Amino acid sequence: MSEPSQKPPPKPTVSSSAPGDGIRSMRSTNVFRAINFELYAKPNAIVMGIGLVAIGITFGYIAYMRSKYEGLGYYSAIQEDGKEVFVKRKSKWE
């Protein structure tokens, strides 16, 4: 009896995608890539750091302005005709 011939295992296909490429490895149109730019752009740590600093400064400025405004002693009051006005707090002794 003759032994059946064995076929060599198939060669692995080489693709241009690397692990972790995600949607970047799929075929798509240029319009899709232009509309969904964030999916194809690689993360940039420098730009992210600048953005975090900018948002931190913005929140800090808002908190500073709010504390300064509250320190002035104004509060919102509603008049009889329904208008909202800001009135300075007065002491009951005045």
Image (spheres, grey):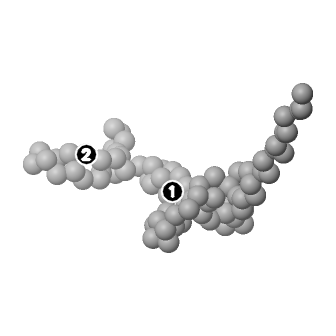
Q: Amino acid at mark 2?
A: Ala
Task: Tell me the quadrant of the picture where the N terminus can be found.
Answer: top right
Query: At numbered mark 1, what does the secondary structure look like: helix, strand or loop?
Result: helix
The residue drawn where x is 63% and y is 58% is 25
Q: Residue furthest left?
A: 81
Q: Position of residue 20 (x, y in %)?
A: 71, 51
Q: Nearer the viewer, residue 64 or 35?
A: 35
Residue 93, visible in the rendered structure = yes
The answer for how far apart the CA atoms under marks 1 and 2 are is 23 Å
With 42 as the anchor, is 38 left or right in this view?
A: left
Residue assigned mark 1: 62
The residue drawn where x is 63% and y is 52% is 22
Q: Nearer the viewer, residue 16 or 44?
A: 16
Above/below status of 88 relative to 42: above
Q: Position of residue 70 (x, y in %)?
A: 45, 49
Residue assigned mark 2: 77
Q: Nearer the viewer, residue 9 or 38?
A: 9
- Residue 94: image quadrant is top left
